[in-house]
Image: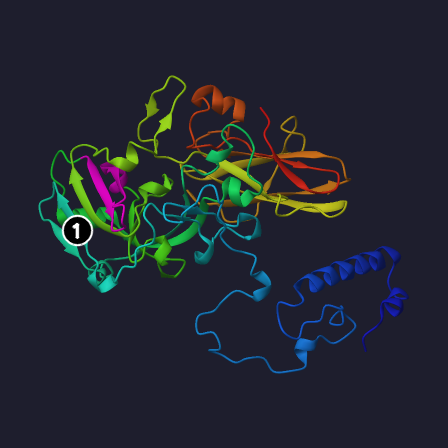
Amino acid sequence: MEKTDKQAGELLPKPELARRRFLMGSMGLVGGAAAGLVPGVSATGNNLPPNVPAWTRSLGPGVLTNPYGQPSPFESNVQRRTVDWLTPDRIASISFTPLADLKGIITPSGVVFERYHAGLPAIEPAEHRLMIHGMVDRPLIFTMEDLMKFPSSSVIRFLECPANGGMEWRGAQMDGVQFTHGMLACCEWTGVMLSTLLSEAGVKKGANWVLAEGADGSHMSRSIPMNKAMDDAMIVYAQNGEMLRPEQGYPVRLINPGWEGNTCVKWLRRLEVGDKPWHHREETSKYSDLMPDGTSREFSFVQECNSVITSPSPEKPWKQKGRYWVEGLAWSGHGKIKHVDVSTDGGISWREARFTSIVLPKALTRFGIELDWDGSPLLLQSRAVDETGFVQPTYAQLKKVRGTSSIYHKNAIHTWQVRPDGSIANVQLS
């Protein structure tokens, strides 16, 4: 027989009773917020203990109601979002991964950020081909069926646009971790090693570069050094256990683990082997870093060691004093994350965080600490160190070397200000 709160109180010590009342109150808030999304859910709290929930009183829909499964309607707020002034026409545009709402290190395919240079092409896989030509012994043309006859490989690796956080370079302005760091994802990628296909074609002596070109309207292209192509670059046709989503390059794309996302050319149609880089539009008009003296860094491929706290964040404020789990993500294009520290006072003192996920090279790593919050204002930061010894820099350190004219490779330590009311603001410390 269910006990009422009063009856339970006769059997529970006072601290446990207080905890149970707090938890029940919190559950009531969640239930009320969710009510109205699904038929049959009450906004009155009538489904809370000791009552029997309404959804247990009838049969639910059977299998194949949704042949392709969808998230719960209670999670409908977990979605990619855009910034109006960045995406006025949605063609040459970007959408952002909802980092604050995700768990673990794998980004669901449906919320991986998007980046288009000429909109989203609709490609018929049976009519798509991947060509390898140029300085090779045997020029080749592969169908999708041909590609899947080769031995496959699967790896978990992050994908990040080099402009991730670039709007913050000269000062804090974006309201939410989705917008400060949301050009980032981590997925399981499945395909064929590029080295396997190049070996099939036979690379000629003196060939040092590969041009990758997409089949979108912009013919997006990037020059890739041969040593990367023969190392861990992959020709990918599947993501998180299913074929690529159209917005992620269906039916085939390039993945260069740890490198700028723009080098991971989507809708891949050809690979040209040559002896020098091509310096095409997307690697000269953009994706080059302007330095303080007016020159540009050429081919800044690797995404440097970085981290960010995802909770709390502007999307995940604190509602009352108490104990909280502060967590975030760290990553490095140079390999594994070795260490992450968290500061509550803007970098004056640091606490070592613990890893709460598997630690893989060139993949997201989740970290966290427990924190008792008494309502005092805080300046929350995270600082990552990778296995090469690279330490995530402060803004002052980064700007001293790189100036303030770039929008790429912003990996400075990020600061969230926790206000006494628990709201979270994006601030920038020098």
Amino acid type, label 1: Met
Task: Quadrant for the C terminus, please.
Answer: top right
Judge whether residue 386 can be spotted in this image: no
Query: As drawn, which residue projects farthest toward the right?
Result: 10
x then y, percent, for residue 2: 81, 75
- Secondary element type, mark 1: strand
Residue nearest the observer in this picture, 43 or 232: 43
Query: As drawn, which residue projects farthest toward the left?
Result: 137
Q: What is the tally of numbered marks visible in this picture?
A: 1
x then y, percent, for residue 119: 34, 51
Residue nearest the observer in this picture, 134 or 35: 35
Query: As drawn, which residue projects farthest toward the front?
Result: 88
- Residue denoted by label 1: 131
Tell me where the magenta segment starts and ends, as one range. Answer: 208-230
Residue in the picture at 31% in, 31% down: 299
Q: Quadrant of residue 285?
A: top left
Task: Quadrant for the N terminus, please.
Answer: bottom right
Q: Is residue 382 left or right of residue 267?
A: right
- Which class describes the residues within 10 Å of circle 1: few (<14), some (14-19), or many (20+)? some
x then y, percent, for residue 294: 36, 19
Q: Quadrant of residue 418?
A: top right
Q: Verify whether residue 212 appears in magenta.
A: yes
Above or below: residue 381 compared with residue 69: above
Q: Verify whether residue 372 appears in magenta.
A: no
x then y, percent, for residue 20: 80, 60
Judge whether residue 338 can be spotted in this image: yes
Q: Is residue 386 left or right of residue 367?
A: left
Q: Is residue 99 left or right of residue 292?
A: right
What's the image's color scheme?
Answer: rainbow
Residue in the picture at 31% in, 50% down: 266
